[in-house]
Amino acid sequence: MNKLYIGNVSEEASAEDLETIFEQWKIPHSGPFLVKTGYAFVDCPDEKIAMKAIDILSGKVDLHGKLLEVEHSVPKRQRSCKLQIRNIPPHMQWEVLDGMLAQYGTVENCEQVNTDTDTAVVNVRYGAKDQARQAMEKLNGFLMENFALKVSYIPDEMATADAPPLGGGRRGFVPRGPPRSGSPGMGARPKLQSEVPLRILVPTQFVGAIIGKEGATIRNITKQTHSKIDIHRKENAGAAEKPITVHSTPEGCSNACRTIMEIMQKEALDTKFTEEIPLKILAHNNFVGRLIGKEGRNLKKIEVDTETKITISPLQDLTLYNPERTITVKGSIEACSRAEEEVMKKVRESYENDVAAMNLQSNLIPGLNLNALGLFPGGAPGMGPSMGHNAPPPGAQGGYSFGGQGQPESETVHLFIPALAVGAIIGKQGQHIKQLSRYAGASIKISADEVSVVDANQVAPPEGMDTKQRMVIIAGPPEAQFKAQGRIFGKLKEENFFGPKEEVKLEAHIKVPSFAAGRVIGKGGKTVNELQNLTSAEVVVPRDQTPDENDQVIVKITGHFYASQLAQRKIQEILSQVRRQQQPKPSPRGEGPPLPRPSRK
């Protein structure tokens, strides 16, 4: 990739002009400039100098009133599934980048390239050429955190799947000391390292043996398995078990887990400990439903394939500060090791699917603070800030009501579920709805009365369709809405209220001030149409509505969970803009804080 294409060249420009610019910026070239109308080509001595020319000149150097565009020259016949993306913001999170790339197709590989620039560079391989072409068209010049992305093809002949990244680093890893947080530009973690650490519980009496004298054993494990291992000895003082977190590649996590099991077995023999020592894996509740599968099929298959017995702690054991379920695996060390690989494979798949779905847009779902969700694993589980959880009495109409009082940024959403599903959401003696309310940090009520919900464009529902619905009233900030609604969608799927191949789609209602309804609709329906195209949800503002006593009207959103969430956040963003515009001038005591923007670390 030594040949450069120089675009946006003025008709007045000559080869001598371009040569002068390259000399001025001390960029050597190995051949003459071939100047055509509006563009030019030149060869550089090597790839590193070509990259330097792109980084220094493209979009930054003016020639006869035009900013030059410099990129790798790739003939059409050599354009492949592989792209190079440059000028990525240095603090960009890997999750955001992955989600952005996934919008255009299947990303088979994404590796970081070492450069001398402050911004990051990655090589990406898509599953098909048309996917790469679409990503090229959409992302080239795309503005992200005030950085305009630069995208170019990597020629087939130069970019093999096994080629090491430039600079000699491992795939997706900048060799600048130990990995930190998760942004490509600043000591990014290895791309091969799993985003999801392995967390296991071990009997407290074996912790000493795992650590070893002066920490020798644990150091040896980390060295052999290329992993970082945290033993949370201070957690749950006096508890019979302690959590251990392993950060590594999936293979490294499995090797460390097996070694720890072998150490515990040896220690048990030496101390004449006769009880069985099962493997106990901790997994976030959000991923467990998919691990179990419809009617337990996924879990049963793992048990059969690995010759183990697997049980999972009940949902009722979850607390606000512990969103993890315990997966207990019984069998030989060899069998438990195989089961760990399969269990964590499912958990990681669920995590990756959730990240990809949440990153439908490059800046995630606007107005949603991911760190407060407790969705994504960190060193230790945490649920982020939540609302209080003093349970008010049941609603005046006989509906169930559990949860906290609203805060200034609290939102209210009416979610409609099949009437037959109410029992599953409430749970025995109201246990499930209580747990859900505490877990999400939201007030959750279920109306006592059935309502009929049909397509806003239909005069009558389709024959045979059950239109009897119950309204779930959820009050809480964006993060609480996400968690509460997500669990309700998941519960309906788990309890088979939707078919095995049927996507869970529910209708949600948001009330907006009547004067703001026009902003949601847009001129000639432009805004609402854009909302539908962007989110894949159906968004309807029914005509001829009579505003309620608070001068509010309803916006109806119908779609699968992530589509609905994105639409809800977009609508709240519009309302936030309306509120800001209505304020006559800034005041130290504003009418309330705006919705939180996505955090970037």
Image (spheres, grey):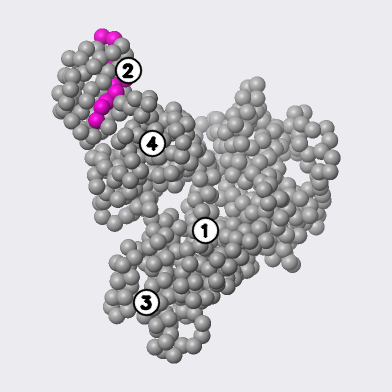
Q: Residue at x 76, y 34 (%)?
A: 456
Height in image: 275 above or below 487? below
Position of residue 449 in the picture relative to residue 505 (left or right): right
Q: CA distance from mark 4 to mark 3?
A: 45 Å
> Badge 4: few (under 14), some or many (20 or more) residues near its Cα, within 10 Å?
many
Q: State the SS at label 4.
A: strand
Judging by the rendered image, the residue that carries numbered circle 1 is: 347
Q: Which residues are magenta?
A: 2-12
Q: Which mark's residue is nearer the viewer, 2 or 1?
A: 1
Can the viewer see residue 59 in this picture?
A: no
Q: Quadrant of the N terminus?
A: top left
**Mark closest to the chain's N terminus, 4 or 2:** 2
In this figure, which residue is indicated by the disc labeled 4?
82
Q: In this figure, which residue is indicated by the disc labeled 3?
A: 210
In depth, the one of 136 and 26 nearer the eye is 136
Report the Cα–Cα distance between label 3 and label 2.
63 Å
Residue at which label 2 appears: 8
Q: Secondary structure at mark 1?
A: helix
| Image spot of residue 547 (x, y percent) | 75, 34
In the figure, is residue 173 to the left or right of 541? left
Amino acid at the residue labelled 3: Ile
Determine the residue positioned at 22% across, 25% down. Answer: 43
Taking the magenta stretch, the answer to whether it contains residue 271 is no
Q: Earlier in the sequence, mark 3 or mark 2?
A: 2
State the CA–CA distance, disc 4 to disc 1.
29 Å
